[in-house]
Image (tube, rainbow, N blue to C red):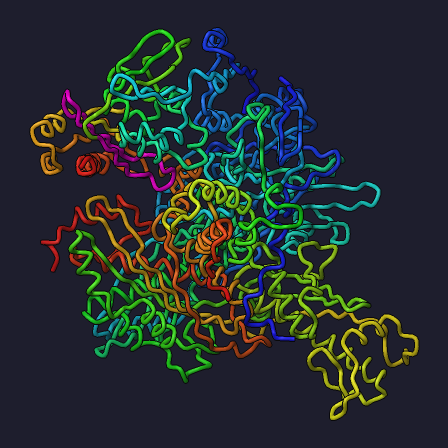
Amino acid sequence: MQKTVSLTVNGKPASGTVEGRTLLVQLLREILGLTGTHVGCDTSQCGACVVHVNGEAVKSCTLLAIQAEGCDVKTIEGVANGDDLHPMQEAFRDNHALQCGFCTPGMIMSALDLVKNNPDPSEREIREYLEGNLCRCTGYHNIVLAIKAGAAAMRGDPVPSGGHD
Amino acid sequence: MYEFTYHKAGSLDDATKLLGAEEAKLVAGGMTLIPTLKLRLAKPSDLVDLGSIASLKGIKEEGGGVTIGAMTRHIDVNRSSVVKSVIPGLAALAGMIGDPAVRNRGTMGGSVANNDPAADYPAAVVGLGATVVTTKREIAGDGFFTGMFETALGQDEIITAIKFPKPQASAYQKFRNPASRYAIVGVFVARTAGGVRVAVTGAGPCVFRVPEMEAALGKSFSADAIKDIAIPEDGLNSDIHASAEYRAHLVNVMARRAVAACG
Amino acid sequence: MAPSIGTPVRRKEDYRFITGQGTYTDDIDRPGQLHAYILRSPHAHAAIRSIDTKAAAGATGVVAIFTGADMAKDGIGGLPCGWLINNKDGSPMKEPPHPVLADGRVRHVGDPVAVVIADTLGHARDAAETIEVDYAVEPAIVDAAAAVKSGAAQVWPDAPGNLCYDWGLGDAAAVDAAIAKAARVVKLDLVNNRLVPNAMEPRAAIGEFDRATGEHTLYTTSQNPHVIRLLMGAFVLHIPEAKLRVVAPDVGGGFGSKIYHYAEEAIVTWAAGKVRKPIKWTAERSESFMSDAHGRDHVTHVELALDADDKFTALKVSTIANMGAYLSTFATCIPTYLYGTLLAGTYTTPAIYVETKAVFTHTVPVDAYRGAGRPEATYLLERIVDLAADELGVDPAELRRKNFIARDAYPYQTPVALQYDSGDYFATLDKAMAAADYAGFEARRREAAGRGKLRGIGIATYIEACGIAPSAVVGSLGARAGLFESAEIRVHPTGSISVLTGSHSHGQGHETTFAQLVADGLGVPIDSVEIVHGDTNKIPYGMGTYGSRSLAVGGSAIMKAMDKVIAKGRKIAAHLLEASEADVEFKDGAFTVAGTDRSKSFGEVALTAYVPHNFPHEELEPGLDEQAFYDPKNFTFPSGAHIAEIEIDPDTGHLTICRFTASDDFGRIINPMIVSGQVHGGLAQGIGQALLEGCVYDKSTGQLLTGSYNDYAMPRADDLPSFALSTNVTLCTHNPLGVKGCGEAGAIGAPAALTNAIVDALKAYGVRHVEMPATPERLWRVIQQNHPAQAA
């Protein structure tokens, strides 16, 4: 079956013709050209595909495109405000929280979901929250620092140093 | 994935009708079904989505317990002030399922209907002596889970809610598979007016109770009371992650920790 | 301008990644692109009686289906192996064919059998399921140690006993003599567990053919596009280099697994020529598990001889290394020259002998994975040293110090071919022990015991050979390639600079580190330096990135090219300043006549180079564009000391890492932020090997049991601690930067440190060794089987 799905992506109306079996991540990447959302596994574990649907983090590889009909979807491409990076993006750069960059979009989308619900997470809470996001490059050390720093910036608190001064 | 026809059910009647198709399947949160379809391990003709039936969502305190709609997500159970105050052990369990993005989609009804041998909710349903409410009847938790991925549900029967009685105390302890993070062993212990219940997930093909532990804990509700109660290995799961012997051992350890966590 | 070298310059490449604008291979769509699905063997070993593609050929959306027979008709060659190893007797190794698509037989689960090309991936996969392959299943062997035993299933008729080679290095007689008169000989059998690299970006490839120009293009997830162009063009598809462009755009991690030339690259490139449309293939993760080259998989017996003063007198190592079913590109050199040569480690052991039997099995090929041979060498060495300390009842740190190579002994010639140029193993160990509060450990052990926990501490020191590699040396050892690196510096008329490098960045941050070199070297702002890599149509012929070589070899090539730019600039400046070339100095971005204030900025010189209105053209060419090739004089030898501190819950076997401390010597550090990131990542992979990761095949069926993240345990954030890092610098003496390399250190030091800590924690149980990965059940069993009452 072919069906047209209409939804809002990064604040703008979008639509695409999909099969029943088309995943949300395929709609985003292959039809809408938003290739910042990645696919790193086929068992819904790696989290490279995390996007926000109606304000909550979901794995876009585990949601049918058709199920996102009418939803408000935000991807990594919609996080910055024009050329102004989001504080969490800044924190990832400033703390060297990425190397190859492949897991990074999912990490940032998950980090934003965490901070929305827990504005001042501890190291332990961050590590536990990242259960569904795999990174093979960083050993997570700098990702944890970045999320702490990004959260502080979002709260308007002084941003802790990541030790890369 | 094989191609299928997708339906968004508008009501339970609608969903029941659509389930009449020969190879139709329900999709709730989809957190197990969609990965299964992606690996082409299932080939449904039709997929019936329960996501827009509002009556299936929500948490109510009633009859001295909590009734949770089948399409209520793990995250909602985990954060619910009602569940936290009436059955904190259940709220905590919901926070241990999958990962945050999975908890944002996965539902109680979906998990219970799927009855994965390593899923967490079956331990709570059996451990708390809950009742599964369907479009046709009410099924006692003890009789609901009939085998690996098998339940008492008929083909056109849909879970609408689960009723959990309030225990005096309850807690869930889970030993995770280091790869999948599913339960290698999960033990739910509840101290109720009708006695103590100990339900085990992950260890066997299907959730089960441990009557010897329940009896011992009925006499003395302490971790020490069950420390010498060994679980037979026979019939337990054995795989590259954990042998039956190790699982049997972990049941005892997790049960003791759950008792201790009941406070 | 303040120097940027030595400072944590934030990465130039990050903007595109944090905004979702990176361009990975699967992000590329070519006009008219089709999709390939590869049908793979479900069996470990089977003869193919027939392949029936009739139904599939007529399925919706299918454009073409190809099998090995179709490739044979086109004269397509096999995938080559890049390193010839000779047996002890001097005869060459067995080198069986490595067909792109199965040649009538499949030899591991996942072996490619046919490719379906269709308008969508869904249609290609739907059609692939209707291909009927008639397999005659035969017995399989997956276990390396079992493969050499009589009666084992045979992978190749021409390699009896499944033996690829039986190689040796060192003085066997001297070792046996030393063992015979030793005061003590410590012996251990151990396994270095098989790993799956699991870069987060699955491999992908897009083939394209332009009939008008006759040019083939391959976009691929590679660490070394020129190597792929050479191997695929010359050995497989017979396309001349000038008609083959290989592009490795943003690549999402490699860790070795993206060095090799893989079948899928040849399939899409060849098939795109057949169907005259671009063809994309992207691995699903479950395909990655059964088609990416795996790592490690050694079974080893080791003996260490000591004299009465606890000095090491000899080391004897015998290893069986699993090659898998076929020889991957560099598979053969890993358990030999990247392994045996490292067995002196940080020690003065005077006599060393190592022998390696490489064996074929019905498994995915095994090749270099982060560390590649060096983690295996370090693991056995640091385990046997700890075991010796335990048997002698001496502190493991003291035993190490007693046997370390002295600070003033460099250059130090080991008995296994390498000559270390510099190092200070005492300093890194002291630093690590201080940072780890080694002295305070026993109090922490007691405190943990009070909580019912078993606490242990473990040290590992390591040496690695990086900066791979001097072409003359590796050539004499059987390498079929040179291992130099190239660089080209193009100074543009208005002073901005493009640096074209043969190195490839897939997370290492070259766009920043290399730019730091050039910004400081030419005295220009870092933002005016662009690093170009990854496209054979842009960059000079270079060997790519692996073996912690990029800065030591690729960076040195940039330094050489920069020297040439400065030399040329000096000529131009001398002309402009009407001075003698010998009197012109280059400093802080300006060419100055020595002892005067007459000066031309680098920008002025660059402009003049391209506006040569009054050049004496017979003496001075226009342009400021220089190329260099750097072939290293020696390997570089990073070293370090890692200390793990862990707690085990004896009730469950669950292990917690309490602290992990690493002190490393990487030579000069260009960007400390990037270096620490490299160490973090290496440590995570080393810890993964020690505690979580292990690739498991079913011994009877040859099925891959760890074929997804449900069964292969990847390190997650909550499995790992934050790391305490420090560095101690001794400079490399033979490259212009004094750098040594940092990419693999963590993966090399961590496994032994962890295992040593585990054995220490279980001391009271009389445990000598625990195999990796030390899963909860494995630890629980050790505790069950060795009651403390039995401990001596």
Residue at x-position 30% and y-position 57%: C658
Nearer to the camera, C353 or C442? C442
Residue at x-position 34% and y-position 76%: C404
Q: Position of residue B77 (x, y in %)?
A: 36, 28
Q: Quadrant of the C terminus of chain B?
A: top left
Q: Position of residue B24 (x, y in %)?
A: 48, 13
Q: Residue furthest right?
A: C613
- The reply to whether the magenta stretch includes residue C605 is no
Image position of C8 (left or right of C218): left
Q: Position of residue C291 (x, y in %)?
A: 52, 42
- The reply to whether the magenta stretch includes residue B177 is yes
Q: Which residues are magenta?
A: B170-197
Q: Residue furthest front?
A: A156
Q: Give residue C475's quadrant in the image.
A: bottom right
Nearer to the camera, B44 or B135? B135
Q: Is residue C161 visible?
A: no
Would you say the magenta stretch is mainly helix, strand or loop? strand
Nearer to the camera, B263 or C699? B263
Q: Give residue B175's quadrant in the image.
A: top left
Image position of C207 (left or right of A57): right
Residue at x-position 35% and y-position 53%: C690
Q: Quadrant of the N terminus of chain B?
A: top right
Number of marks drawn = 0
Above or below, B43 against C205 in this view is above
Q: Residue furthest bottom?
A: C595
Q: Residue furthest left?
A: B219
Q: Position of residue A164 (x, y in %)?
A: 50, 64
Q: Is residue A76 visible?
A: yes
Nearer to the camera, B89 or C500? B89
